[in-house]
Image: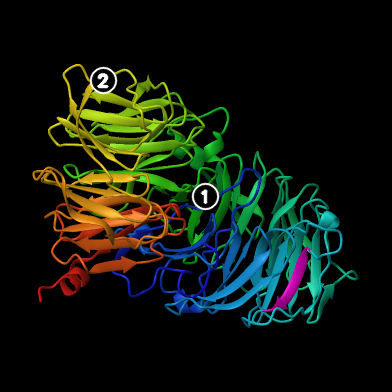
C-alpha cells in the first residue's frame, strides 16, 4: 500500500461487515506497552480499550468481556492510517479524537466519532519513535515524547492539536530519549516528562511551556530509567515508576516529593495507572505480577500473580511470555494488563477494589500477520496461524478465540508451534486433526481432542502449501510433493519436471490437482502405494503461474487462479472451461485464496491487493468487490456451510473479519 487516505484508513462503513476480531497489542521486551482505558466523555458509558498493534491502532469495545450479561461477537475499530509501527495512541478527553504516533516520528490526529475517521493532523513530529502522547484538558494541545535520531531535534514537544505549532520549549532529556509524559488535567497547566538515560522527571509550566527549575520540583528520585508517569484525574498528585522498581508520589502543582516506595516489584516496573477515584495505583512488572497500591498511605494492598495464572503452575522464574509490560483501568476501575506474548488479561476483584471480574479472564489471538486458515465445519471451529508460529482455534458461532496452542515441552508461554520458525501452511482433516507445516521443515499434528502431538513428521524440504481430502493430505514443498495417509503414513518426496505452486484433493482422495509454475493444471490419480499417476493436463490454463486451486463442494467444478485471472473448469465434461481467461480478471496482485458458497453458485476470492471479490456462475459478468478488506493482503477466505453467504476472511493485518453477503449478493446477482 503506497499511501493512506480516508478511503482505506479503515474498512468503509458501507461494507457488510458483521464482526471483526482485532490483533493483540504489539509488545517489545524491555519497553512499556501503552494501553489507554480512558476513552473520553463521549464514551464513558462503555468499556473501551485503545492500543497499538503493528501498523494498526485498535479501539476494542470490552463490554462483552467485562460483563457476563452481554453476549455478542467481538466489536472493534481497526485504524490503518500509519505506514510504520505504531508506538503510542491516546484518546482526547472528549473522546472525539485519537492521537497516534509511530516509530518514524509520524503523528496523526484522527476522528473517532466520525464513521470515516478522517485525519485532522498528519505531521512528522520527531526524528525517532514517539513513545508517549498526552492531551490537555481543553483538547487543544498535545504533548509528545520519544527519541531523536540526531543531535539537535527535540525529544519532548508540546504542540497545537490541529496545526502542529509549538506551544513552548519543554525540558530535553539526556541523549534525546524520553519515555513518558502527562498533562495536568486542570489549571494551572503543567506537563511532566520522564527520561530513559538521565533517570529524571522534568516539570514544565505554561503556556508557553518551559521547565520549572526553581522551587520544589524533585526530579532525581529514580536511579534507573523512568518508564511511566501519570497525573490523577483531579491533578492533585503525580505518580512515576521505573526500572529501579520504585513508585514515587508527588504533589500535582509543584511536583514536590510526597512519598517513595522502593522494591515494589522484583522486576522492572513498566506502566502505572490511576483508578477513577484516584485512591489506587495499578502497576505491572516483568516479574509477572500486577500490584494495587493505595495512594494514602503509599503501600501495596493487593497483588495479582498473572504469570502463575497464565502458566497454570508456580514457577521459580517468570516465563518470558508472561512478563507484563502494560496495564490500564477500563471504565474507571476494571484492571487489565498485557504480557509480552500479547495476551490481554482482565484481573479479578480485589478486597479493596470491588470492580472487575470474579476470576481472571484471558483474551488471546494473534499479533503477527496471519498466513492462512483451516475450517472444521463439523465442529464449528476454525484455525489460524501466523508468521510467529502461533496457532489459534476460534468458534464460528462467536468468532472468539477458544485456544492458543503451545508445542509440547515449551514453558516460555510464547506459543510457538515450530520453535522459532514460521508456520507456512495448515489444514484440517475429516477426522478433526489439524496439521501445520513450518519452515523448520516439519509437520506438526493437533489431534481431534485439541492436544498437540509431541512427535513431528520430518520433511526433505520447506513446505509451502497443504490440503486434505478425507484421509489423504498433500504437502507442497519447494522440491516437490509429499502425501500423508491418515496423518500417519508419509510417502517419499515426489518430484516433477515443473515446480508445484498450489494443490487440492478430491473428497474421495482419488484425485490430486496441482497448479504449476508452468501455468498448467496437472491432474493425478492416487495409487495404493502413495504414488501419483498423471491422467490429464489442462494446457494453457493460465497466463501466469497458478497460486490457488479449489474444488466445489460437490466436486464437479475446479476453480484456479493466478496473479490476475480466475478460471472455472467442468470436471465431468473433460475439464472444459466454464469461466475462461480474461473474464474474471480484476485482481491487481496475486490471488491467494478461493472458496465456494455452500450451494456452489458463488465463488469468493482474496488477493494480495487487499480485495475480496464475489463471483456468480449464473451472472458471470457481474461481481461484488470489496477493496481494502485487509491491510497487507488477504491470506484466507472460507464460507460457513451452516449459514447463508457468511464468509470469514483473514489477512496480513492479523485481523479476522466476518462478512454477510446475502443481501448484497441477492441484489447484484438477481435474475433479469
Relative to residue 395, is residue 81 depicted above or below?
A: below
Query: Which of the pair 295/68 is nearer the observer?
Result: 68
- Which picture quadrant has residue 616? bottom left
Instruction: Count neighbours of disc 2 (C-alpha within 10 A) and say few if under 14, some if 14 to 19, many if 20 or more.
Output: few
**For residue 393, above or below residue 235:** above
| Residue 156 magenta | yes
Q: Earlier in the sequence, mark 1 or mark 2?
A: 1
Identify which residue is drawn at 80% across, 68% down. 203
Q: What residue sits right under mark 2 in the picture?
A: 488
163 versus 328 height, above or below: below
Residue 158 included in the magenta stretch of the image: yes
Q: Secondary structure at mark 2?
A: loop
Find residue 338 and name its label.
Answer: 1
Name the disc covering residue 81, or none. none
In the image, residue 670 lies at what x, y percent? 13, 73
Q: Quadrant of residue 390?
A: top left
The answer to whether residue 100 is above or below residue 472 is below
Amino acid at each position: 500500500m503506497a499511501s493512506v487516505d480516508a478511503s482505506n484508513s479503515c474498512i468503509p462503513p458501507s461494507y457488510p461487515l458483521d464482526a471483526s476480531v482485532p490483533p493483540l497489542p504489539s509488545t517489545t521486551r524491555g519497553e512499556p506497552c501503552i494501553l489507554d482505558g480512558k476513552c473520553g466523555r463521549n464514551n464513558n458509558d462503555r468499556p473501551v480499550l485503545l492500543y497499538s498493534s503493528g501498523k494498526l491502532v485498535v479501539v476494542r469495545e470490552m463490554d462483552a468481556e467485562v460483563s457476563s450479561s452481554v453476549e455478542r461477537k467481538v466489536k472493534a475499530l481497526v485504524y490503518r492510517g500509519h505506514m510504520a509501527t505504531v508506538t503510542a495512541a491516546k484518546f482526547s478527553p472528549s473522546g472525539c479524537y485519537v492521537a497516534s504516533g509511530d516509530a518514524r516520528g509520524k503523528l496523526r490526529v484522527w476522528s473517532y466519532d466520525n464513521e470515516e475517521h478522517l485525519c485532522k493532523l498528519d505531521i512528522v513530529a520527531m526524528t525517532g519513535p514517539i513513545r508517549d502522547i498526552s492531551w490537555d484538558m481543553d483538547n487543544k494541545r498535545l504533548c509528545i515524547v520519544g527519541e531523536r535520531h540526531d543531535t539537535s531535534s527535540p525529544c519532548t514537544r508540546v504542540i497545537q492539536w490541529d496545526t502542529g505549532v509549538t506551544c513552548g520549549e519543554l525540558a530535553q532529556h539526556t541523549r534525546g530519549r524520553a519515555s513518558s509524559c502527562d498533562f495536568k488535567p486542570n489549571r494551572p497547566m503543567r506537563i511532566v516528562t520522564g527520561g530513559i538515560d538521565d533517570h529524571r522527571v522534568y516539570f514544565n509550566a505554561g503556556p508557553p511551556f518551559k521547565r520549572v527549575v526553581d522551587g520544589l520540583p524533585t526530579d532525581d528520585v529514580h536511579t534507573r530509567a523512568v518508564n511511566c508517569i501519570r497525573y490523577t484525574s483531579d491533578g492533585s498528585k503525580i505518580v512515576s515508576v521505573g526500572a529501579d522498581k520504585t513508585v514515587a508520589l508527588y504533589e500535582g502543582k509543584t511536583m514536590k516529593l510526597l512519598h517513595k516506595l522502593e522494591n515494589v516489584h522484583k522486576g522492572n516496573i513498566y506502566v502505572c495507572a490511576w483508578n477513577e477515584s484516584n485512591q489506587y495505583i495499578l502497576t505491572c512488572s516483568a516479574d509477572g505480577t500486577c500490584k494495587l497500591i493505595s495512594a494514602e498511605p503509599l503501600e501495596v494492598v493487593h497483588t495479582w500473580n498473572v504469570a502463575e495464572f497464565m502458566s497454570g503452575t508456580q514457577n521459580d522464574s517468570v516465563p518470558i511470555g508472561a512478563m507484563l509490560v502494560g496495564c490500564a483501568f477500563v471504565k474507571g476501575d476494571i484492571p487489565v494488563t498485557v504480557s509480552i506474548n500479547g495476551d490481554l488479561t482482565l484481573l479479578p476483584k480485589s478486597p479493596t477494589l470491588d470492580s472487575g471480574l470474579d476470576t481472571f479472564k484471558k483474551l488471546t489471538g494473534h499479533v503477527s500477520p496471519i498466513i492462512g486458515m483451516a475450517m472444521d465445519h463439523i465442529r464449528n471451529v476454525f484455525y489460524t496461524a501466523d508468521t510467529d508460529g502461533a496457532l489459534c482455534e476460534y468458534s464460528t458461532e462467536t468468532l472468539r478465540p477458544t485456544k492458543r496452542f503451545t508445542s509440547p515441552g515449551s514453558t516460555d508461554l510464547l506459543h510457538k508451534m515450530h520453535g522459532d520458525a514460521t508456520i507456512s501452511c495448515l489444514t484440517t482433516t475429516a477426522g478433526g486433526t489439524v496439521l501445520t507445516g513450518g519452515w523448520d521443515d516439519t509437520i506438526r499434528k493437533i489431534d481431534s481432542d485439541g492436544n498437540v502431538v509431541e512427535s513431528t513428521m520430518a520433511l526433505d524440504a520447506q513446505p509451502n502449501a497443504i490440503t486434505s481430502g478425507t484421509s489423504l493430505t498433500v504437502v507442497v514443498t519447494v522440491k516437490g510433493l509429499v502425501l500423508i495417509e491418515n496423518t500417519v503414513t508419509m510417502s517419499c518426496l515426489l518430484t516433477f519436471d515443473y515446480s508445484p505452486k498450489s494443490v487440492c484433493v478430491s473428497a474421495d482422495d482419488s484425485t490430486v490437482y496441482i497448479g504449476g509454475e508452468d501455468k498448467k493444471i496437472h491432474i493425478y490419480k492416487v495409487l495404493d502405494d502413495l504414488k501419483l499417476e498423471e491422467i490429464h493436463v489442462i494446457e494453457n490454463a493460465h497466463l501466469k503461474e497458478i497460486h490457488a486451486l479449489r474444488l466445489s463442494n460437490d466436486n464437479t467444478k475446479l476453480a484456479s487462479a493466478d496473479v490476475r485471472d480466475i478460471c472455472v473448469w467442468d470436471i465431468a465434461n473433460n475439464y472444459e472451461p466454464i469461466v475462461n481467461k480474461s473474464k474474471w480478471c480484476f485482481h491487481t496482485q496475486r490471488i491467494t485464496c478461493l472458496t465456494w458458497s455452500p450451494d456452489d453458485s458463488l465463488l469468493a476470492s482474496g488477493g494480495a491487493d487487499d480485495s475480496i471479490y464475489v463471483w456468480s456462475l449464473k451472472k458471470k459478468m457481474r461481481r461484488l468487490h470489496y477493496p481494502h478488506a485487509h491491510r497487507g493482503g488477504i491470506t484466507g477466505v472460507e464460507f460457513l456451510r451452516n449459514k447463508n453467504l457468511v464468509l470469514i476472511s483473514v489477512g496480513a493485518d492479523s485481523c479476522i473479519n466476518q462478512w454477510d453477503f446475502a443481501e448484497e449478493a441477492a441484489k447484484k446477482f438477481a435474475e433479469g
